[in-house]
Image: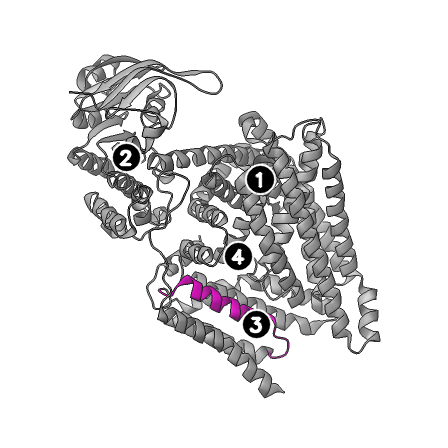
Amino acid sequence: MRHLALERWARGSSPLHHRDPRAKIVALLVFLIALATDSHGLPWFALGLVVLLVTALLWARIPVWGALARAGIVLPFSAVFAAVSWLAGDPARGAPLAMKSYLSALAVLVVTSTTPLPVLLRGLEAMGAPSFLLDVGQFLHRYFFVISEEAQRMNQAAVARGVSGRQWGFGGPVFRASAGALAVLFGRSYGRAGDIHRAMLARGFDGRFRPLRTLRFQRADLLFTAVASLAPIAMRLAVERALA
Amino acid sequence: MHIPDGFLSTPVWATLDAAAAPAVVYLTRRAQRSLEENKVPLLGVLGAFVFAAQMINFPVGPGTTGHLVGGALLAFTLGPAPASMVMVAILAVQALVFQDGGILALGANITNMAVMGVLAGYLPFHIWGATRWRGFSVFAGGALSVLVSACLALAELLISGVRMPGSVLSVSLALFTVSAILEGAITLAVLRALEKVQPKTIHYPRPGRSPVLAGVALTAVLLATVGVLFAASGPDGIEKVLNLHAGSLQVNLLRQASTGILGLAMIYGACLVIGRVASRRRSL
Amino acid sequence: MSPLIEVRGLSYRYEDGTLALNGVDFRMEPGESVALLGPNGSGKTTFVLHLNGLLRGEGSIQVCGLPVEKPNLPAIRRKLGVVFQDSDNQLFMPTVVEDVAFGLLNLGMENEAALSKARAALETVAMSAAESKAPYHLSAGEKKRVAIAGVLAMEPEILVLDEPTTFLDPPGHRSLAELLAQLPQSKIVITHDNRLAAALCKRAVFFERGQIAAEGPVDSIVARFGWDVSWERTKSRS
């Protein structure tokens, strides 16, 4: 599954990996907002941003082509909308839309490929997001792969029992077999949650999650935040000035 | 239905982000209070379940498959506020790990799917779930959750200036309807199976509760959705305005902002209703 | 000498009314290890969940001299550690070391101390290299070791293991048995593997339909109830 590559990249060890997640989140937001609010600078601004992101990928020792390809997941969506806009007599909208959505996806990828999700969630918690929500997100992430494997296996078994040439379709046996499989999986997941809770209690859980490592914002993080935030802003100003 | 970054105009995504943030905080607190004990593992695991279930293909016809979205199902088994919160977690993980949906667009996606979609999905069940119209209310809930989310997303795109010829609009709406029916059917099928296997996991509303507030809320949600979509897609209105006024940018922004404020109002109204309904659940 | 565990007249009913345990008496002395044998659904796991208060039934239970009641639970849960059957449900934290340290942090230990104790526990189970890994990337045998480390870190006096060799391949099975044999704690082992039971425990208790049908040396219980895993092929007719 393609997500495994991301997990592997995120556990790497480069200066960018070691930056505080809060620094990366702030830099990402500045980047995204600078990009989203731009209306004229586009092809040149986009070029500058690509260079910025590729530099970050190289610095983080993330496979550049792999990342560029993975960010391309938004392109079919953009292509459809570009086509629709063209049909509606607004061809100029397509290219900026594709560029913006691609670059945004790539920027997010730079952050998520250098920060394991649980660390990112802790960064968000330190920035004020509700802990309950983030704890749920952490568990969701932990058990997603386990349950989706379980789901695939169950569904295959269920469909194998239900299939027969002309029985595909709405409400047919395959449909009902899959729905039944989902219900069983739901029940199993409910039971699993109970088991997990008991395992937590057995080791003294009292309702509060205590982090093993606390985040510490250091000078390197401050420097990174400043440079990474100013870069897209400076680029945009330069492009706008040049075009004016 | 997950809107990526770059599609929405700044007034739209910014307003929806500003509106969704306090809504998420409110819903999280509501969810925490409506569950008897720290239920992090349950919500996390069921969120993982929905996320995984979204990948199971249901045959719709020759060569076409659809899948469950799950907001309504979560609402029927956890209650609306926890369901909303789990959907928020799912959307966040999808955006971060799978690049499914943008980051600046999270406010919009959360509003559409986690707030309005869950609410529209839950309300029919709240009204009829304890009556003999139960099956219908489950189906309607599933269908409405998808329909409302999709229409709101479409409306936001239109307001942002993405232009669509009428034919594409109609095809989109037709596709939404098919997805909605599929969601209703799958949700109903799964819930029926659950009734046989694990009936305790379903949160039925108590019979005899006044459905007036819920009915009003549901009507409001539907009217708001239709209204926004209507306003957004009125092409003549936008054309005329843009042609008549050279400084049309201001009017356009004003329209966008006012629709954004309408969105804000919808979200706050939705949260209030979810909160009311969720606290009634707790007093059962 | 006072017993490590003393159970008297334990009964427990499920929500739907079925009787899961029906008047169970059990005793374990310090230094002993006991195997719990019996058919699936006979109440072995249900019994064990009462020892640290995860389930509450009728009757009296004392662990290390403390009655199993709400105020004593934190102390009891430190002294009696449970390794559950499904390691995935026990390793719920994002990384191995965070999971092993979980119990220690709950006891109020400082981060630095918890980290070093967790590392020591990982050393004991030979999983130090996996410290920063996510549980999803571990094999069944590795997950079981980490789960054990998470329990050992709390320095319990009693180790309860629920079918520890499920999901393990033969090499995994053997190396786990070796590891468990080296651990000094008193053990209660639920297992279907008579050889593991014989290797780790002197005494066995046989559960049947929520009651203890018999107890005695492992080998004689196994022989009496036909609980041996090995089988002989009957001679085929020519």
Q: Position of residue B8 (x, y in %)?
A: 65, 64
Q: Position of residue B77 (x, y in %)?
A: 57, 35
Q: Which residue is mark 1?
A: B74
Q: Secondary structure at mark 4?
A: helix
Query: Residue C78: which numbered mark, if any?
Result: 2
Give amino acid for label 3. Answer: Leu
Instruction: Pick whichever, B266 or B163, lies toward us.
Output: B266
Q: Chain of mark 2?
A: C
Observer-side mark, 2 or 1, equals 2
Q: Position of residue B173 (x, y in %)?
A: 73, 52
Q: CA distance from mark 1 to mark 3?
A: 36 Å
Q: Quadrant of residue B144?
A: top right
Q: Position of residue C162 (x, y in %)?
A: 30, 29
Q: CA distance from mark 3 to mark 4?
A: 18 Å
Colouring scheme, one of rainbow, by chain, secondary structure, one colour: one colour
Q: Chain of mark 4?
A: B
> What is the chief secondary structure element of the magenta stretch?
helix
Q: Secondary structure at mark 1?
A: helix
Label 2 environment density (alpha carbons within 10 Å; few <14, some 14–19, many ≥20): many
Q: CA distance from mark 4 to mark 2?
A: 40 Å
Q: Which residue is mark 3?
A: A35
